[in-house]
Image: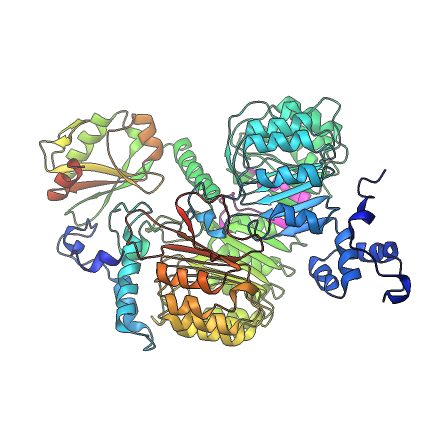
Amino acid sequence: MDPYSKRKKELPERPPESTRPSPFPDEVLELVLGLLKSNKDRSSVSLVCKDWYNAESWSRTHVFIGNCYSVSPEIVARRFPKIRSVTLKGKPRFSDFNLVPRNWGADIQSWLVVFASKYPFLEELRLKRMTVTDESLEFLALNFPNFKALSLLSCDGFSTDGLAAIATHCKNLTELDIQENGIDDKSGNWLGCLPENFSSLEVLNFANLNSDVNFDALERLVSRCKSLKVLKVNKNISLEQLQRLLVCTPQLTELGTGSISQELTERQYTELENTFKHCKNLDTLSGLWEVMTPYLPVLYPACTNLTFLNLSYAALQGLELANLLRHCPQLRRLWVLDTVEDKGLEAVGSNCPLLEELRVFPADPFDEEIVHGVTEAGFVAVSYGCRRLHYVLYFCRQMTNAAVATIVQNCPNFTHFRLCIMNPGQPDYMTNEPMDEAFGAVVKTCSKLQRLSVSGLLTDLTFEYVGRYAKNLETLSVAFAGTSDWGMQCVLGGCTKLRKLEIRDCPFGNAALLSGLEKYESMRSLWMSSCNVTMNGCRLLAREMPRLNVEVMKEEGSDDSQADKVYVYRSVAGPRRDAPPSVLTLSGI
Amino acid sequence: MAYEGDLNLKATELRLGLPGSDEPKKQASAPSIRSNKRASPEIAEESRTRSNSSASIAENGDRGIDEPPAKAQVVGWPPIRSYRKNCFQTKQNDAEGEGACMYVKVRVDGAPYLRKIDLKVYKSYPELLKALENMFKLTIGEYSEREGYNGSNYSPTYEDKEGDWMLVGDVPWEMFICSCKRLRIMKGSETKGLSCL
């Protein structure tokens, strides 16, 4: 019996047939609207009329909540009674860089409690930057008998004990994706907690766990799970062990290897080569920790159909990357370390004509005496060869305005342009001028730009350009930039589609903050830290805009009047009640 | 952060430059290149102060060693997620450990250039300190847990994986080997400052 069939009693009274505008029975409308997958479309649909609003609410099975404090679980459950899949994001993004106190909040438990009663048939939970305790994981495992997919990205608060609870109790698990979390790795045998006859797993990712897993249990698991498509192991899995796993999983589409660092005999090398020859279905390859580069060629046969290659843990040199890329003709996305240097990026330009996304991470971000890494030349080389490039994340130690202008001329389709010149406030190293013209070129040329991160020495002119030209911009990240309030005012006034604005160490004060009064309700959130905003400015904002939550985090030893870190976000749930003492909620009545 | 301008903290800054040289004023010179569009002189001044102070103060307000401003221990900068940071540091130490040698730079206050030594050659602190004394023709003295290196003008310090400057000798030798990224032998009045902590 459909547990939700009692809805007819709960809906508001339907007007009589003759006055109802819609010719369709509710069920037909729901069936049609049920085919809509995009949340944006669903939001539009829900605004048409009451019937459509209700039909959309009843037919929605997946809800995405970009800020867990913007709404309460009760409100969500009231509006969407048939949810089977939830995606929740918690802390502000700058928590990834230690700018948010540890006990800030975003605890999943209060959500789980409501879900247990309103969505007992919940199947999927995807969390990003939430606090998840072992108790919550156990609660999840015990209260949702249909639970299938758990994905935790950048979460904290749990240990491998919590994973053991999931493994033990979730009989229908298809996905266990544990990425990049602050996990308390107690080792232990969580993997062995999966029952011996358990075989439904399709996705298993434990790449960022540091401790050993029970390899025998893993091998048996992998051979039982014929539907396994994604397997990402951690660095403690050796090459030999990986080979044993791969023999059981020719159907894999995504593979994260362990470390490629042990010595191999010639026979082992050949066996490994043969194993990879059979991995013809791979579209994603990652891992490659501590890779011993003479062994890279074993991977070549597996690269024919690769579209995503993640080498961001492998300290390759340029030549090694070049050799590898020659075997990856289908590459769309590439992540590398800057150990490949400009030469490596030239090889990217030459070998990857279909490339759409490039991320270059710094191998040694905190060593100021480093003289290598990548420069503007590497980026320019990529832009000449990869005309379809639309997503870039680039960490470098030098850049010029001219180079960026060339880059966007070659690749005008950027949707995501994230440039990090690692030395704060560094000018164009050839002309010694600010980098204003670089970002001016980006926003003038790339009309589809959705996300922008700026860096280097920047005056208000950069932000004038952004406000004037970046009409599709949704996310802007700013650090150590700007000259005065005017910069931020330009952005708030000009970027009509802005949703997320995060600012640190900029000379923007109360005038800038308050110029966005009308705007913040149309945005997801605003973050400002180490700027010139004061407590009074924040209090004024909170008073004028009661539907915004205004939160201030004070640092030890700072002036009473300074608002060190400010986080402003719209909410229909009112001020939160779970803030720790270090977070002051200034929200109005 | 607002109090920076008043307390003349410049006089008490720990600097890594050679005595008598000015620190490269990368950020201080930056405002002069900025456009004339400033709301008021106060904001420009404060922003310069602020950017210098962010560069030298870690999250809890502790004073880090004041490196050339742009490259110091700014919290959360560059924006790399912690799990990535930890990976690389482990990897680099492993790589250095597996090889036959482990060279680190050694800076001595007052010396015209740096030297490099291979930490793997030494098996203990006394060996290392003796080698440093020989190399630089100075006396470092005896380590004591309570007072650091008393009886001499020099204190050996090292930068660990997290970017903090530590006194050599506090942790077991094996742990020191794994976490030492570079050495600095501090001199004179700054040494006294350290032992007052």
Q: Nearer the viewer, residue A511 or A586?
A: A586
Give percent across and percent down for residue B185.
Answer: 19, 40
Q: Nearer the viewer, residue A334 or B40?
A: B40
Q: Quadrant of the N terminus of chain A?
A: top right
**Which stretch did the figure color magenta?**
A295-318
Q: Is residue A451 visible?
A: no
Residue B44 lies left or right of residue A251; in this view the side is left
Identify whether A40 is placed above or below A95.
Answer: below
Q: How is the image coloured?
A: rainbow
Give percent across and percent down for residue A186.
Answer: 51, 26
Identify whether A397 is placed above or below A363.
Answer: below
Give percent across and percent down for residue A349.
Answer: 57, 61
Residue B137 lies left or right of residue A535; in this view the side is left
User: Residue, x 58% and y 26% (percent of image)?
Assistant: A213
Identify whether B91 is placed above or below B173.
Answer: below
Give percent across and percent down for residue A113.
Answer: 63, 37
Q: Is residue A506 visible?
A: yes
Tell me where residue A223 sits by quadrant: top right
Residue A487 lies left or right of residue A111; in this view the side is left
Would residue A28 be counted in the magenta stretch? no
User: Residue, x 31% and y 51% (percent of image)?
Assistant: B72
Would residue A314 be counted in the magenta stretch? yes
Residue A493 lies left or right of residue A110; in this view the side is left
User: Residue, x 24% and y 62% (percent of image)?
Assistant: B25
Count of marks placed on residues? 0
Tell me where residue A412 sits by quadrant: bottom right
Q: Nearer the viewer, residue A551 or A298?
A: A551
Q: Nearer the viewer, residue A34 or A551?
A: A551
Residue lying at the far left of the rendered structure: B151
